[in-house]
């Protein structure tokens, strides 16, 4: 098991690698690293040592690649699926990744797939189950694991912890690292009334491995974390608030649909860099 105090490399500023924009990603100026969805990689090809051409080019250029899982479901009552864990481990080895990441969510129950990342009950019983699932995953993975906070549209009535308290306790029990998604924090602020400043104060920021930034849209008072719209200033403000407390080792821009022109993607990366350098206006 890797403790939260174990040093991880400074990743810098990166973007989510997607096959639809692979050549665009290759040409983005000043790119330090990329994140790739593990489930989008062919396991047989990884085991044979074959990467998608664009990822091979980036790796040869010295760009760090981090696998990001979306289907492990560590927040469920069932034990982690060995095959899904094997995929993450194989991806980490094939990409020479310094860590892997997944979501603090449940995605299936009784063999039924939800098709969505669902929030876990933040109870003591849930914490005990999730901590055990995390320990199992850590034992099978060759690199440290980071868990991401998710966007939610509901809160469980049996919650006994705030999100920050729950994550802090999970870090204390397992040494897991954190992937803090500031867009998801903003989503939960709009939809659930989350006090972001209070939650940031509760988080063990020394455990943060990196940060996600993404765009979304508000419709009829509900924030939708679409990953298909430009990053808004309120999301960048959350990033700025986090950076006031601790500078994260890495920040990554997520975009999954309606891909804009390369210059617009580069501009969003520059906006992130501006926050990291303390230059965001109106904050």
Image: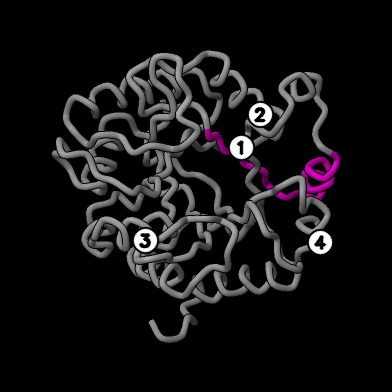
The disc, 2 or 3, on the residue closer to the chain's N-terminal end is 2
Marks 2, 3: nearer the viewer: 3
Read off the residue under disc 1. Answer: 67
Q: Residue 75: image x %, image y %? A: 36, 29
For residue 216, which numbered disc appears in the image? none
The disc, 4 or 2, on the residue closer to the chain's N-terminal end is 4
State the separation of the CA atoms marked 2 and 1: 6 Å
Which of the image's four quarters has the C terminus? bottom left
Is residue 69 located in the magenta-colored stretch of the structure? yes
Quarter occupied by residue 122? top left
State the separation of the CA atoms marked 1 and 3: 30 Å
The disc, 3 or 4, on the residue closer to the chain's N-terminal end is 4
Q: Residue 134: image x %, image y %? A: 38, 25
Q: Which of 247 and 164 is in front in this view?
A: 164
Report the magenta residues as a range. 53-70
Residue furthest front as drawn:
220
For residue 222, which numbered disc appears in the image? 3
Q: What element carries label 4?
A: helix
Q: Which residue is drawn at 81% across and 19% down?
A: 48
State the separation of the CA atoms marked 4 and 2: 23 Å
Read off the residue under disc 4. Answer: 27
The disc, 1 or 3, on the residue closer to the chain's N-terminal end is 1
Quarter occupied by residue 111? top left
Circle 1 Cα neighbour tier, 10 Å, few/some/many (<14 / 14–19 / ≥20): many
Q: Residue 155: image x %, image y %? A: 24, 44
The disc, 4 or 1, on the residue closer to the chain's N-terminal end is 4
Q: Is mark 2 on a helix, strand or loop?
A: helix
Q: Residue 163: image x %, image y %? A: 26, 47
Read off the residue under disc 2. Answer: 91
Q: Which residue is drawn at 34% across and 33% down?
A: 175
State the separation of the CA atoms marked 4 and 1: 20 Å
Q: Do the residues labelled 4 and 1 touch (CB within 8 Å)?
A: no
């Amino acid at each position: 098991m890797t403790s939260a105090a174990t040093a991880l490399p400074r990743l810098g500023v990166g973007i989510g690698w997607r096959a639809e924009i692979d050549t665009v990603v290759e040409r983005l100026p000043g790119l330090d690293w990329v994140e790739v969805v593990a489930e989008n990689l062919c396991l047989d090809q990884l085991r044979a040592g074959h990467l998608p051409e664009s990822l091979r080019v980036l790796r040869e250029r010295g760009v760090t690649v981090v696998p990001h899982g979306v289907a492990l479901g560590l927040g469920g009552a069932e034990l982690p699926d060995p095959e899904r864990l094997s995929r993450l481990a194989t991806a980490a080895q094939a990409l020479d990744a310094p860590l892997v990441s997944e979501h603090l969510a449940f995605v299936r129950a009784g063999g039924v797939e939800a098709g969505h990342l669902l929030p876990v009950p933040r109870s003591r019983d849930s914490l005990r189950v999730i901590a055990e699932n995390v320990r199992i995953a850590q034992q099978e993975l060759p690199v440290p694991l980071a868990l991401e906070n998710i966007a939610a549209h509901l809160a469980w009535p049996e919650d006994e912890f705030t999100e920050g308290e729950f994550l802090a306790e999970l870090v204390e029990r397992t040494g897991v690292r954190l992937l803090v998604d500031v867009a998801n924090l903003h989503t939960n602020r709009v939809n659930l009334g989350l006090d972001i400043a209070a939650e940031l104060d509760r988080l063990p920021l020394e455990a943060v491995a990196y940060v996600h930034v993404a765009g979304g849209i508000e419709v009829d008072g509900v924030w939708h974390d679409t990953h298909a719209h430009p990053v808004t200033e309120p999301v960048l403000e959350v990033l700025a608030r986090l950076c006031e407390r601790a500078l994260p080792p890495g920040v990554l821009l997520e975009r999954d649909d309606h891909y804009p022109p390369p210059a617009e993607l580069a501009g969003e990366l520059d906006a992130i860099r501006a926050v990291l350098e303390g230059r965001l206006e109106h904050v």
